[in-house]
Amino acid sequence: MPNMTPKKTSMPEQEPSARRNNFNEVALGYTEEMARGEATRCLHCKNQPCVKGCPVGVHIPDFIRSITAADYEGAYRTIKLTNSLPAVCGRVCPQENQCERNCVRGIRGEPVGIGRLERFAADWHLKHGEDEPFHAEPNGHKVAVVGSGPAGLTCAGDLAAMGYSVTVFEALHVAGGVLMYGIPQFRLPKEIVQKEIDALKAKGVTIETDMVIGKVLSVDELFENGFEAVFVGTGAGLPSFMNIPGEGLVGVYSANEFLTRVNLMKAYKPGYDTPIIRPKVAAVVGGGNVAMDAARTALRLGAEHVHVVYRRAEEQMPARREEVHHAKEEGIEFNLLCNPVQILGDEKGKVKAIECIRMELGEPDASGRRRPVPIEGSNFQIPVDAVVMALGNTPNPLIRTTTKGLEANSHGCIIVKDSMETTREGVYAAGDAVSGAATVILAMGGGKQAAKSIDEYIRSKSGVNRSR
């Protein structure tokens, strides 16, 4: 009989008063007993609606059944059949909008904690399991993958499993993309990301860092060097600003720069002399997950007060409810229905305040959300010494402007077919470079589809029948 408890098994966490002062992971993970108890809540529905909600098609009831039987390694191996980054997805995937949203248990209570169970299985393997020796018969074909974020890592791993010689080209000095530079240590420990990357290398994937494709080498030159297909997974790393007075002052950051300095340049670690302002009072502009990450990071850098400034109401914030909840627990102050109009500086050109105007909700806009409208004469100032703009990102234009025949839409996103093939033959793309800023798991789903399409493309070009 399934466990009909209406609520998920709670995830142990650091106390807010403690975690706001450190960069250790907030969520501590399930014990074996907790995991088995939560796993027994699964009804093992015949039509498996949860699987249909997963962008990479994880066999969810199967891995949960293994956890129920205390076969934790079996659960991990089931997940790995379709998901190359389970420890990552178990932490940062928005399951509430995907697999768990489709869970039948959610109709009269809370859905099964699929993400928490995925994390448990992955962490159990990292601590107790051993990866089986990898062997794929080389097929003699070469593929280049540009970018080592979730889309690129997934595409590379799937192609390597098919026998391709894969080289990943990463612009930064460390592989991992947004998993390394964007998501804070307290949500996604970098050691876990590195283990996933090491597992990819064990498959024979070559990773070359400090390789800015479009500068060091062009896509055309990759083809000239013997690569038969190129996958572009360069993400969306170009930050957006408001174009208001004062954005050039010292102490104004894009969220990308701020989080990169903390995560990739190790400002979160004692002993690293990372050039970054450690604010006493910070304002973070935006209402998405990146805004929550930046606000909670500023707090951990020593800020006494951190303000989130968002022009809509809380129910319209795109951030995960869990992230908003954690931010509130940690003491982040929310200034809702407010919009910045200028940033004020002192005589030395440093930030001293942010001026905002209060908003009210008007008629719905194109997104279906009610449009925020300024209330005349409601301006006010918040004294701050740092401002982080977390307003979203767009794809960097370098690849598309240096590659012949590669077309993009008006937002700078690379245009692809359902197969992830671009308008240039032999070039495929997925992830944020195609969709704009989105989720890790959606990028991975695109990377999987691209790997499949690349395999079909190269086989058709070489006259090999696809028997798999």
Image (cartoon, rainbow, N blue to C red):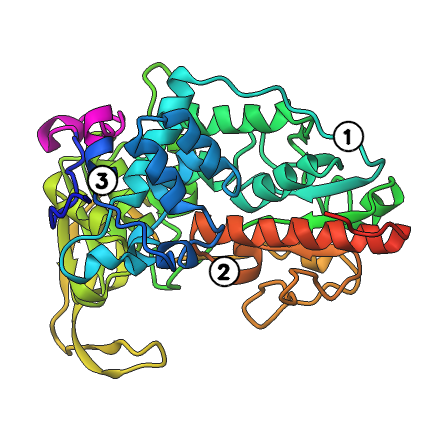
- Label 1 belongs to which residue? 137
**What's the residue type where badge 2 is placed?**
Gly
Return the residue nearer the eye: 249 or 331.
331
Query: Which numbered disc covers residue 40?
Result: 3
Q: Is residue 10 left or right of residue 245?
A: left
**What's the residue type where badge 1 is placed?**
Glu
Q: Is residue 270 left or right of residue 80?
A: left
Q: Secondary structure at mark 1?
A: loop
Q: Secondary structure at mark 3?
A: loop
Task: Let me know if residue 193 is in the magenta part.
Answer: no
Task: Let me know if residue 18 is in the magenta part.
Answer: yes
**What's the residue type where badge 3 is placed?**
Thr
Query: Which numbered disc covers residue 436?
Result: 2
Q: Is residue 347 visible?
A: no
- Judged by depth in the image, the label closer to the viewer, 3 or 1, is 3
Marks 3 and 2, Cα distance to the nearest angstrom?
38 Å
Residue 142 in the image, given as x and y percentages of width and height: 80, 39
Residue 232 in the image, given as x and y percentages of width and height: 66, 50
> What stretch of residues is rendered in magenta?
14-35
Residue 267 in the image, given as x and y percentages of width and height: 36, 26
Q: Residue at x 73, y 51 (%)?
A: 454
